[in-house]
Image (cartoon, helix red, strand yellow):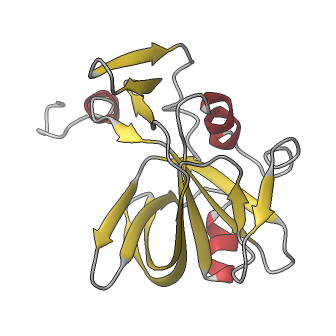
Amino acid sequence: MNNNGVVSLEQLRACSRQLAAGVTIVTTCDVKGYPYGLTMSAVVCLSLEPALFLICVSEKSDTLGPLLESGTFAINVLGRGQETLARTFASKGRAEKFKHIVYDLSSPTRLPVLANALAVVECKLIDTYAGGDHRIVIGEVRVTRMNGGLPLVHYDGRYLGVDTGSHSFDYVACRDLSSERA
């Protein structure tokens, strides 16, 4: 805390890293049909009735503009073993993210849906709110799919695979992604 009683950015980031979260890739297409996406853990099922999801997207993200233009997005829930995919979509820029991955364009929304995602939630954007350096986006759920498997979790700058047999976590070596988030 500084002299004014305000928490520093470094303190807030360190504290926030202690909150374990599922790892997703949020995807959309721009009006020309080009795919965009980013790795995200700021994803919440906001309401069951009506079915709503909430995501928080950096105002600097390359994906935010196309998402707002198209008015649709897909939340692809990643599973254990998909750390490389999470790292790829955590980087800035659109060009290379979709180059070497398998995805389909869903019907009827035409959203990029990643192969082997544990689950996919397709949403229609219904509202946005300013949230500091992020945009809070609320989407109405239109389609869900579940493939099953074990989730990928992000905690303290690392990806973790959940081992349900022993109720423990396996640490997966990776670099700290806190400064790379889109």
Is residue 167 among the parts visible in the rendering?
yes
Q: Position of residue 84 (x, y in %)?
A: 67, 29
Picture quadrant where residue 156 is located: top left
Q: Residue 33 falls in which quadrant of the image?
A: bottom right
Q: Is residue 29 above or below residue 43?
A: below
Query: At x 69% / y 60%, what residue is drawn?
Result: 113
Locate residue 173 relative to residue 101 in the image: left or right. Answer: left
Camera-side residue: 58 or 55?
55
Residue 180, relative to residue 161: is it above or below?
below
| Quarter in which the N terminus is drawn | top left
Residue at (71% x, 37% y) in the render: 88
Relative depth, front residue between 147 and 46? 147
Left or right of residue 163: residue 95: right
User: Is residue 157 visible in this depiction of the protein?
Assistant: no
Marker count (numbered): 0
Q: State left or right for residue 37 relative to residue 141.
A: right
The image position of residue 117, as x and y in percent, is: 60, 49
Q: Residue at x 76, y 48 (%)?
A: 93
Percent across and percent down for residue 44 are 35, 60
Q: Position of residue 163 (x, y in %)?
A: 38, 23
Image vertical order of residue 176 relative to residue 108, above or below: above
Vertical comparison of 89 with 158: above or below:
below
Residue at 18 percent of width and 31 percent of height:
2
